[in-house]
Amino acid sequence: MLTIYRTDDCVIHELDEFQEGAWINLVNPTMEESQEVAENFEIDIADIRAALDEEESSRIDLEDGYTLILVDIPTTEIRHESKNYTTIPLGIILTTENLITICTEETPILQHFIQRRVREFSTKKKMRFVYQILFRTAAMYQSNLRIIDKKRTEIEERVGDNTEDVDLIELHELESTMVYFATSLRANGVVLERLSRYKRLEQYPEDKELLGDVIVENQQAIEMTSIYRDIINGTRELMSSVINNRLNNVMKYLTSITLVMAIPTIISGIYGMNVRSEGMPGANSPYGFAIVCGAMVVICIIALLLLKKKNMLWVFCLGNIIEKNRTEKSVSSDFGEGNNFLFVSGLTLFCFRRILFAKGIITILFY
């Protein structure tokens, strides 16, 4: 799409043809539109199409009759069925009398100028216009970084309650975004430094002051990216530690169940051996079954007391989890929704197997 704008008395309006002092805005232009602009302003069509390559790096080129400036700007894309941030190139071409912008999609950075949200904006003051675009770019980076940090805070708040797989994926996407932002901001910083050194580009004192502000804002965005990336790495390590700790707790609970349930299993296994009953204690006594069951209960109680002393008693741990769920009125627990279901299923399976062992003891002793 090709649109032409021009400001008269600080009011922007759209034109139907190329004029001196106009701003030509190309959004994902066709080959015909690119060819038309290249022929009218004597520009190499490769420089116009360069901004349409998503892998194009930021740079500044001085050509005969025009100057090409390529910078990376932030935008959004859909990854893993969610909106995430990335960067795309924005091309700015300065000719003798006009300014041309090229981008693959509509960007809020340029929409601010079209919607008259920028003060002291004029398409005739080309260098000031360029610096205003770069200033809006740095401000957009900072705004997106604050949104990313807010998402990171939301994930961190869920770490202690019900961390899910989607949180890990979102955290990975935030880390990827930080890598894109850090690379693009450093490249934009190099372009800004070269702009401050070039004598060929006509600059007024107020333009140089605005360029200084742009450099400061870009450097601040770089520092914000570095800080937030370190914080995200810390959040990821915290999440990994919490998940490992929960896994250790689950293994501790299952171990306590195994220890307690192993006692009846061993005793029932001994009494379930196919041997003569003369040497089995209580085999010929009418109270043999009660004696054996009582012995198992006593040994189990001793084991429970020892586990409680070591803070490994799964009964009390499970009671705390259930009480917490009732208080928060939440389905999830310290195990997570999936792990809670697996824990209860495993407990039921253990109890069912022990009932079968007890039935075997009764069958052996009384039949």
Image: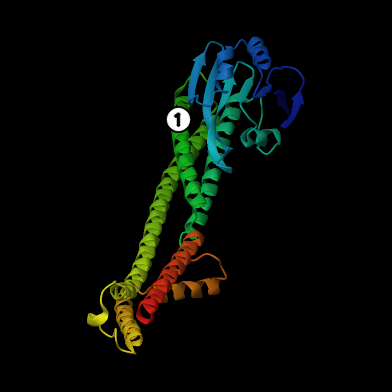
Q: Describe the colour scheme in one phrase.
A: rainbow
Q: Locate residue 339, reporting x and y percent.
A: 46, 61
Is residue 166 at least partly visible in the picture? Answer: yes
The single residue placed furthest to the left in the displayed view is 279
Residue 177 shown left or right of residue 253 in the figure: right
Q: Residue at x 44, y 47 (%)?
A: 228
Q: Which quadrant is home to the N terminus?
A: top right
Q: Is residue 128 left or right of residue 18?
A: left
User: Which percent across, then down, holds residue 288?
Assistant: 32, 86
Q: Which residue is mark 1?
A: 187
- What secondary structure is marked by label 1? helix
Q: Residues within 10 Å of mark 1 (few under 14, many from 20)?
A: some
Q: Nearer the viewer, residue 286 or 259?
A: 286
Instruction: Specify the farthest residue to the bottom.
Output: 286
Q: Quadrant of residue 223?
A: top left
Q: Position of residue 160 (x, y in %)?
A: 46, 62
Tell me, yes or no, if residue 161 can be seen here: no
Q: What is the count of numbered marks?
A: 1
**In this view, 252 is above or below 182:** below
Residue closer to the observer: 296 or 53: 296
Amino acid type of disc 1?
Ala
Quadrant hosting residue 143: top right
Q: Is residue 203 above or below residue 31?
A: below
- Which of the pair 312/194 is nearer the observer? 312
- Hey, which quadrant is residue 37 in on the image? top right
Residue 277: give x, y in percent of width and height: 27, 80
Residue lying farthest to the right in this orientation? 16
Q: Residue at x 61, y 27 (%)?
A: 104
Q: Is 73 placed above or below 252 here?
A: above
- Identify the residue at horizontal 37%, vertical 65% (top origin): 249
- Residue 9 vertical placement versus 152 (above, below): above
The quarter of the picture where the C terminus appears is bottom left
